[in-house]
Image (tube, helix red, strand yellow):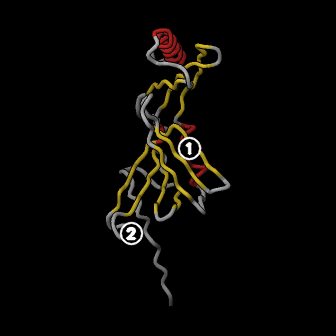
Amino acid sequence: MTIFKRDRSPIRTERGERLLATAEADGVHLGGTRDALYVVRPIGGGAFELADTTRIPWEEVEAADWDLETSTLRVTEVGTWGETRPEHTFVIEEPGRLLELVRERVTASIVLQRHVAIAGRRGVRVIARRAPRGDRPVVWLYEYDDGVDPADPVVQAAATEALEAAQAEVGLL
């Protein structure tokens, strides 16, 4: 009789979370839960006894793009205007359900997104994000179009007015 031993995933989630989808990308293990994307990289000789785990909550994922031709998933985190945003790139030959989960969870974290034109079509986008499980406060962000200076008083006034209107609409004032 042959007994098959299931390999245990090297992804260790936070308490109360359960892996819903996994994939492997060049020795890096990726996993998604209801609350976050996990990236686990082996340390040293490739064994996962020692591993570096990065947990990216879905509400902190600004964008996740899939390139079918190169089988590449690019995940960009929310950042601060003017600073380089953390970006993670993975080549995944067999993404399985992970891509569906990433799209669904990131979308679920967006409460509101509104663009306000300031100079022609260029302006600021007011974005409200919340953890998909809904147990954390809404986080409000600004995203400025290229060529829009957030230090300009006119831009600041328009952004503040747009934020107040969006908060009133969502009922958070």
Name the N-terminal-most of marks 1 and 2: 2
Residue at horizontal 37 percent and vertical 55 percent from the top: 53
Residue at horizontal 56 percent and vertical 44 percent from the top: 64
Q: Separation of disc 1 and disc 2 at Cα?
A: 27 Å
Q: Horizontal placement of 75 versus 96: left or right? A: left
Residue 113 at x, y percent in the picture: 57, 25
Q: Horizontal placement of 113 versus 135: left or right? A: right
The crowding category of the residue bearing disc 1, from other C-alpha atoms within 10 Å (few below 14, some 14 to 19, many at least 20), is some
Location of mark 1 (residue): 64
Q: Horizontal placement of 27 versus 64: left or right? A: left
Q: Residue 20 carries which label?
A: none
Is there any visible trace of residue 29 in the rendered image? yes
Q: Identify whether 10 is placed above or below 108.
A: below
Location of mark 2 (residue): 46
Residue 97 position by quadrant: bottom right
Please state which amino acid type lies under the numbered disc 2: Gly
Which secondary structure, mark 1? strand
Residue 152 at x, y percent in the picture: 46, 13
Please state which amino acid type lies under the numbered disc 1: Ala
Residue 103 at x, y percent in the picture: 59, 44
Residue at horizontal 60 percent and vertical 59 percent from the top: 96
